[in-house]
Image (cartoon, rainbow, N blue to C red):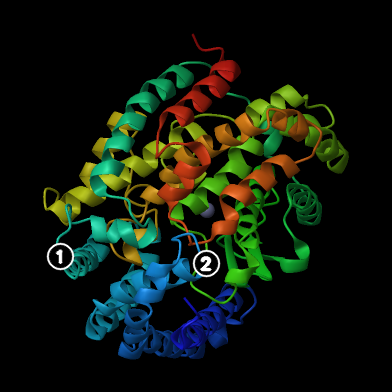
């Protein structure tokens, strides 16, 4: 079949939408890095204008007609052909956005701004009652959102679908239950032993040296500085304005060696995924990571499976010590390795270690489902939160600031689907790493030599280059021969921490 003229028109329209989104991303990046506070009001308006114009273009019925006209051409292609993927993904986006009335979006936008504002004051004041009415309305809006997609199996499905396309509440719940069953006793076993001594990490480490060391590490991993840069921000993130400009931003704490270092590796993992997308997808909806879970699988692969591994530090510890001779000169590698892998029962998700982290996520996911199902009331949420911390982590927060108020997600967006991606990512990271290892058994030795090309190239070939052309499940199945499976991740944790803590 010859190229239909509608394909060219479709691409022009998709490029325009993408250009508006990337311009908004640039304004956002500036807002969280360099913008003086006086710019805030105008910047909010400018972002709203760009979002409105992009949205009008995204739901333009003319776009829907083009996609209809292109159906015959799409059917004539192999599903793996780039044009077929482009039409398929553009149609998915169009159909989703067209179901959401403009009034709803405007109402949500206003509500989220007010909710976030209240939360930012209620959190330091430990005032759950101030945010509770906002949370009630967020819950109502979340249920209304789900109802734009009738026919769902679970009310959370349309919300989960937003971040992790194709995942269902039932599937995620079953996976998480299995993971929790393995994690709770593992945490129990580890924390019954004397805790690792991590005092070496909490000394004075000047920012400039931390920055230089972090840059050396991510350069070795394969972050492309010709198509990226790093800046400073209160909350670390990765953003991109094109496949040729993928930036990261992190926060430095001069009294904590690992906070900036591991978030630099984490954000570089996200960035390497975006930098590895097929350049032919530039400017289209295919030029993006395929799901929040798949994205986290890459940030966590590089941060944890690689960056907190023994072979990695066999290579980098002598360099780190040379950078900080006064601070680490007398600390052996063994002590440092145990310190960066310290496991403890803790209250704050973002500070949690690799083993306990998923318990923080799983309980949030379960509470989201209970709220949406109506089996948990907003007023009972703080107590339900404490209850789950007691049963899963063996500790409970003394106040809501360190409990239900700690994460921004429920106060700045919909309820349902906000958290599962973090743990799905951990699960996938182990599956993908195992598959890479089967193809290249020399990877651990390479890592010990400070060489990461075999692992990176395998990820690029099997994950990165596909962008959104394949779903997370398709990528996993093709790359590993299996759908989501918690066993490789549990095996990874049991092996690593079994060795560290000499568990039976
Ligand atoms: Zn991340």
Indicate which disc residue 457 carries.
none
Q: Is residue 13 above or below residue 336?
A: below
Asked whether 192 or 69 is in front, the reply is 69
State the residue lying farthest toward the front: 1
Indicate which disc residue 82 carries.
2
Q: Is residue 411 above or below residue 498?
A: below
Q: Crowding at label 2, few (<14), some or many (≥20) Cα neighbours within 10 Å?
A: some
Asked whether 103 or 3 is in front, the reply is 3
Q: At which x and y percent is residue 5?
A: 47, 88
Q: Crowding at label 1, few (<14), some or many (≥20) Cα neighbours within 10 Å?
A: few
**Residue in view at x 55 percent, y 61 percent:** 235
**Residue in view at x 45 percent, y 66 percent:** 77
**Residue in view at x 39 percent, y 53 percent:** 406
Distance of label 2 from label 1 (alpha carbons)? 30 Å
Indicate which disc residue 150 carries.
1
Asked whether 243 or 87 is in front, the reply is 87
Q: Is residue 151 above or below residue 198?
A: below
């Amino acid at each position: 079949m010859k190229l239909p003229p509608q394909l060219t028109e479709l691409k022009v329209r998709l490029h325009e939408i993408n250009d508006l989104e990337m311009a908004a991303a640039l304004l956002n990046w500036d807002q969280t890095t360099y913008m003086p506070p006086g710019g805030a009001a105008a910047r909010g308006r400018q972002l709203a204008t760009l979002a409105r114009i992009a949205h009008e273009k995204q739901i333009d019925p003319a776009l829907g007609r083009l996609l209809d006209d292109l159906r015959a051409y799409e059917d004539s292609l192999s599903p793996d052909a780039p044009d077929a993927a482009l039409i398929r993904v553009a149609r998915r986006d169009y159909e989703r956005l067209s179901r959401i009335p403009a009034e709803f979006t405007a109402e949500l936008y206003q509500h989220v701004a007010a909710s976030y504002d209240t939360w930012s004051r209620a959190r330091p004041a430990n005032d759950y009652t101030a945010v509770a009415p906002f949370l009630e309305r967020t819950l109502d809006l979340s249920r209304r959102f789900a109802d734009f997609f009738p026919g769902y199996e679970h009310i959370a499905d349309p919300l989960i679908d937003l971040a992790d396309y194709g995942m269902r509440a039932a599937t995620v719940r079953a996976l998480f239950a299995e993971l929790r069953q393995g994690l709770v006793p593992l945490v129990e076993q580890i924390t019954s032993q004397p805790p690792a001594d991590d005092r070496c990490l909490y000394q004075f480490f000047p920012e400039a040296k931390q920055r230089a060391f972090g840059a050396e590490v991510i350069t070795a991993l394969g972050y492309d500085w010709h198509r990226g840069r790093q800046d400073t921000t209160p909350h670390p993130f990765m953003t991109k304005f094109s496949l040729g400009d993928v930036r990261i931003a992190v926060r430095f704490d001069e009294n904590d060696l690992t906070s900036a270092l591991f978030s630099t590796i984490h954000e570089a993992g996200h960035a390497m995924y975006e930098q590895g997308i097929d350049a032919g997808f530039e400017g289209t909806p295919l030029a993006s990571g395929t799901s929040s879970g798949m994205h986290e699988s890459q940030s966590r692969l590089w941060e944890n499976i690689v960056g907190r591994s023994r072979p990695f530090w066999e290579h980098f510890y002598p360099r780190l010590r040379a950078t900080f001779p006064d601070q680490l000169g007398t600390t052996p590698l063994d002590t440092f390795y145990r310190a960066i892998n310290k496991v403890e029962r803790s209250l704050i998700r973002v500070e949690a270690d690799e083993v306990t982290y998923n318990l923080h996520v799983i309980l949030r996911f379960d509470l989201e489902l209970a709220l949406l199902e109506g089996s948990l009331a907003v007023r009972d949420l703080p107590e339900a939160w404490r209850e789950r911390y007691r049963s899963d982590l063996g500790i409970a927060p003394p106040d809501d600031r360190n409990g239900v108020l700690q994460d921004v997600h429920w106060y700045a967006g919909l309820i349902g689907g906000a958290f599962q991606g973090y743990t799905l990512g951990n699960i996938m990271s182990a599956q993908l790493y195992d598959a890479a290892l089967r193809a290249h058994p020399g990877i651990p030795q390479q890592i010990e030599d400070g060489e990461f090309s075999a692992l990176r190239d395998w990820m690029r070939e099997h994950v990165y280059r596909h962008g959104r052309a394949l779903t997370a499940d398709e990528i996993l199945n093709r790359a590993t021969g299996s759908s989501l499976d918690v066993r490789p991740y549990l095996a990874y944790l049991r092996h690593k921490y079994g060795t560290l803590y000499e568990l039976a």
